[in-house]
Amino acid sequence: MKKTFLCILLFAATAFAGTDKAQMDSFKKESPVLRNAIGDAVGSVIPGRSYIDLPKASYLEGYGAVITLEVSLGPTRSPFGSPETPEQVRKMVDQRRKEITQKLETVLKQRVGTMQSILPNDSVTIVLYLLNSNPADVPDLPGQIIFTAKKPAQKEDPMQVTVQEF
């Protein structure tokens, strides 16, 4: 009885693994393109080395894709750099945060609908971790911004992106 149950379990596991493998292979092909688009969007807003960590993507079965990256919106204060006032730092960080938010929303709206590895009604989420390199100047900077787009069931349906700050 135990052997029969074990055989059925192994057969079921291999049957389900075959369908997921094709989807995972598709995601592995689409993932670098999406990660590069996200990286380009962030890099166009922040000059120099904006990344603390490059975009990384994971596929969660039953949910969709999750892409994470960490950035610093402003340079760390240094005794050797040009001094900026706290108002200038706040203005720069707020402007960059607004631009990155707009660009990442645009990337999701353009890319999610065309991705073959994301099933209808699955989601793509970008988790943008923000390093506050000047906490005295920008004390209210959120630690992360989460962008979520759900792939519509119909191609004609509009793409909605939700943005949450934590």
Image: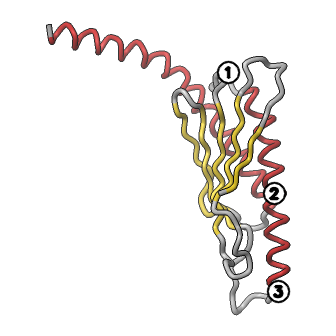
Whether residues under marks 3 and 1 lie with C-beta atoms below 8 angstroms apart, the answer is no
On the image, numbered disc 2 is attached to which residue?
44
**Residue at x-position 73% and y-position 32%:** 112
Q: Residue at x 81, y 57 (%)?
A: 44
Q: Residue at x 70, y 64 (%)?
A: 50
Q: Which marked residue is nearer to the observer: mark 3 or mark 2? A: 3
Image coords of residue 153 (percent x, y):
72, 19
**Whether residue 162 is situated above or below residue 166 in the rendered picture:** above
Instruction: From the image, tell me which residue sits under label 1.
Output: 120
Return the x and y of residue 115 as percentages of the image width and height: 70, 27
Whichever of labels 1 and 2 marks the residue nearer the N terminus, that label is 2
Q: Secondary structure at mark 3?
A: loop
Rounded to the nearest whole Å, what is the CA distance between mark 1 and mark 2?
Answer: 30 Å
Q: Residue tagged by mark 3?
A: 85
Taking the spot 82% from the left edge, 49% from the top edge, the residue there is 103
Q: Quadrant of residue 4?
A: top left
Give the spatial CA distance, label 3 vs label 1: 48 Å
- Closer to the N terminus: mark 3 or mark 1? 3
Where residue 97 is drawn, which disc sits there? Answer: none
Q: Is residue 153 left or right of residue 7?
A: right
Q: Say left or right for 20 vs 126.
A: left
